[in-house]
């Protein structure tokens, strides 16, 4: 008689033994990860790498691993920077503004971004790899794909694009494809989220239509717009109807990159306020001004392309504040055609223009104490426009000497203070031509892009360069070794002036940021971004900040501590 199988005391049948726990292969050891690292470290690999696969194939997890996985920089080679950017729910405009901000350039449109990256002088410590996830879930997948196709042709960046099987991928002359549907060693992600590379049929799928926009605010309500996710607002304005929402939509599209990068609702309200055109709903300005109260600025006025009451003064290439006398409250505004207009600081109303027009455009201007205005043209040559006051003969001789020098050695930047003309050059040096002689300083690595000078108890020169630094120098002394300010983008404009609380320096960089820096008293530095690329800045005698772009001129005054 066979023996009975032992039973538990309570009479229940014993449970079957648990199956052995399944061990998931670490992502870093899977073939897809090896293929990505091989592409990343091959200097001759195509600029575009597509990571494809069906839902649940692990695409998002693989890109997340790549973003976190560190590699050692080889000796003599700069480190590769990896920039993760989610595409889900984004419009092409939102993607362009996000990438522009991460890469240190300014772009009003997707086409502007491709051009800016191809032509900019932005300093970067190494190559940049963009890790772009969820192309299939973008609000405008076709338009985003076109943008990424353009970026794939830019030499300074490389792209890893996650795209679900069946989604139209970006185009490029050469492409590396990592197909996770063919990666037999890759386990699906456990409990995948259907909205984020989720589970389901892994076969080919049609390109999905734009997903609905969750939580879209009332696009006509300034409070709701400033409080909402700025990328969501961008998608709403970019994909919605042509309704102008009282002028908010036009203002948002004008300043969108700065709005998406702004630090909180108050800063967004300030930027949006400075971007409103004269045809906007009159109720918007007080509403935005109230919400901008915590911001470190107050807007005096702003003039934009298309404004008629009061009129827009035209594109700004250079700015300057007159140095004293009866025209002390006037601002000089030069454009790319070589015309210099005079505006009142109080309200930007016109007061005529300089009689002299520079053929080929102006790159810098420098008003002097006697009313003469010095201009630097695009060829680096000097022009002098005489004021109404008699000019001392020694200043005439000084100007003629500088003009002769620049005819042989063109300048790249220009400033003036009593008895001196200051010039920057393409090799990084700053030259102060004075009645007592010439002083020089090798201040920058690369071209000097801007100089300014202040007449104070200790006159100083401030210079900016393509190396992104702003440096101080008193002629006759060694330059201050530490930069006054520094960013990874080239300096595009500088201006310094005496102010009621001490000298102020305004600096602007090619990434769209402007800073107002006090030289005495230890006051706070204040920053502002108008949205479009900044072409010129100026500090007025009252301590106000002027910011000029191709389509706007804005006047701000510091507020609070």
Image: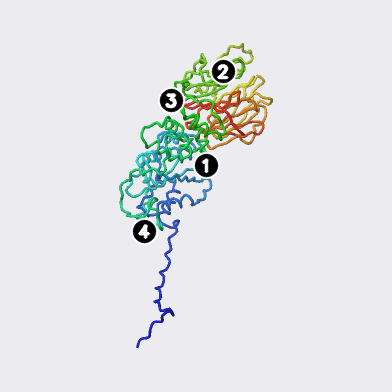
Residue at the extreme right: 457
363 is higher (above) or lower (below) than 296: above
Residue 279 is marked as 3
Q: Judging from the image, what secondary structure is the residue with disc 4 in?
A: loop
Of 264 and 114, nearer the camera is: 264
Q: Nearer the viewer, mark 2 or mark 1?
A: 2
Tell me the distance, in whole angstroms, between the alpha carbons under discs 2 and 1.
Answer: 40 Å
Q: Position of residue 550 (x, y in %)?
A: 46, 26
Q: Which residue is mark 1?
A: 125
Residue 373 is marked as 2
Q: In the rendered structure, are the residues bearing label 3 and label 2 in contact, judged by CB atoms less than 8 Å apart?
A: no
Q: Earlier in the sequence, mark 4 or mark 3?
A: 4
- On the picture, is 49 further left or further right than 383? left
Residue at the extreme bottom: 1
Q: Earlier in the sequence, mark 4 or mark 2?
A: 4
Q: Judging from the image, what secondary structure is the residue with disc 3 in?
A: loop
Q: Position of residue 448 (x, y in %)?
A: 55, 29
Q: In the rendered structure, are the residues bearing label 4 and label 1 in contact, judged by CB atoms less than 8 Å apart?
A: no
Q: Nearer the viewer, mark 3 or mark 1?
A: 3
Classify 10 Å Cα crowding around label 2: few (below 14), some (14-19), many (20 and above): many
Classify 10 Å Cα crowding around label 3: few (below 14), some (14-19), many (20 and above): few
């Amino acid at each position: 008689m066979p023996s009975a199988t032992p039973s538990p005391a309570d009479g229940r049948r014993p449970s079957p033994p648990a199956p052995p726990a399944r061990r998931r292969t670490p992502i870093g050891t899977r073939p897809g990860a090896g293929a990505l690292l091989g592409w990343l470290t091959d200097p001759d690999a195509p600029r575009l790498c597509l990571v494809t696969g069906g839902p649940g194939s692990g695409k998002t997890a693989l890109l997340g691993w790549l973003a976190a996985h560190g590699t050692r920089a080889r000796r003599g080679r700069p480190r590769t920077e990896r920039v993760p950017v989610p595409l889900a729910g984004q419009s092409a405009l939102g993607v362009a503004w996000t990438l522009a901000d991460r890469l240190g350039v300014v772009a009003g449109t997707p086409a502007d971004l491709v051009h800016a990256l191809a032509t900019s002088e932005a300093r970067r410590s190494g190559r940049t790899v963009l890790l772009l996830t969820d192309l299939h879930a973008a609000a405008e997948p076709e338009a985003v794909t076109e943008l990424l196709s353009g970026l794939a042709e830019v030499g300074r960046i490389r792209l890893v694009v996650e795209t679900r099987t069946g989604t139209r991928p970006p185009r490029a002359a050469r492409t590396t494809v990592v197909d996770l549907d063919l990666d037999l060693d890759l386990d699906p992600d456990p409990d995948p989220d259907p909205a984020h590379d989720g589970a389901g049929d892994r076969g080919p799928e049609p390109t999905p239509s734009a997903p609905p926009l969750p939580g879209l605010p009332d696009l006509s309500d300034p409070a709701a717009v400033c409080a909402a996710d700025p990328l969501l607002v961008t998608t709403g304005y970019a994909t919605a109807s042509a309704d102008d929402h009282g002028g908010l939509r036009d203002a948002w599209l004008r300043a969108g990159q700065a709005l998406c990068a702004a630090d909180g609702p108050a800063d967004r309200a300030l930027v949006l306020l400075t971007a409103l055109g004269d045809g906007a709903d009159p109720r918007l300005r007080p509403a935005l001004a109230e919400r901008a109260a915590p911001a470190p600025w107050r807007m005096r006025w702003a003039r934009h392309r298309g404004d008629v009451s009061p009129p827009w003064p035209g594109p700004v290439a250079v700015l300057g504040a007159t140095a004293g006398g009866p025209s002390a409250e006037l601002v000089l505004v030069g454009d790319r055609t070589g015309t210099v207009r005079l505006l009142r600081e109080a309200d930007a109303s016109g007061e005529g223009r300089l009689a002299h027009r520079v053929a080929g455009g102006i790159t810098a201007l420098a008003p002097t104490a006697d009313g003469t205005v010095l201009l630097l043209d695009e060829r680096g040559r000097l022009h002098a426009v005489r004021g109404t006051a008699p000019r001392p003969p020694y200043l005439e001789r000084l100007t003629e000497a500088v003009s002769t020098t620049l005819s042989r050695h063109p300048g790249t930047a220009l400033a003036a203070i009593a008895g001196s003309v200051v010039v920057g050059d393409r090799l990084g040096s700053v030259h102060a031509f004075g009645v007592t002689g010439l002083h020089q300083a090798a201040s920058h690595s690369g071209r000097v892009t801007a100089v300014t000078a202040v007449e104070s108890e200790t006159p100083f020169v401030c210079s900016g360069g393509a190396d992104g630094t702003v440096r101080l120098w008193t002629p006759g002394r060694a330059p201050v070794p530490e930069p006054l300010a520094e960013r990874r983008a080239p300096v595009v404009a500088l201006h310094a002036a005496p102010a009621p609380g001490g000298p102020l320096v305004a600096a602007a960089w090619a990434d769209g940021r402007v800073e107002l820096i006090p030289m005495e008293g230890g006051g706070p530095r204040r920053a502002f971004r108008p949205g479009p690329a900044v072409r010129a800045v100026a500090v007025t005698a009252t301590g106000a900040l002027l910011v000029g772009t191709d389509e706007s001129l804005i006047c701000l005054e510091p507020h609070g501590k």
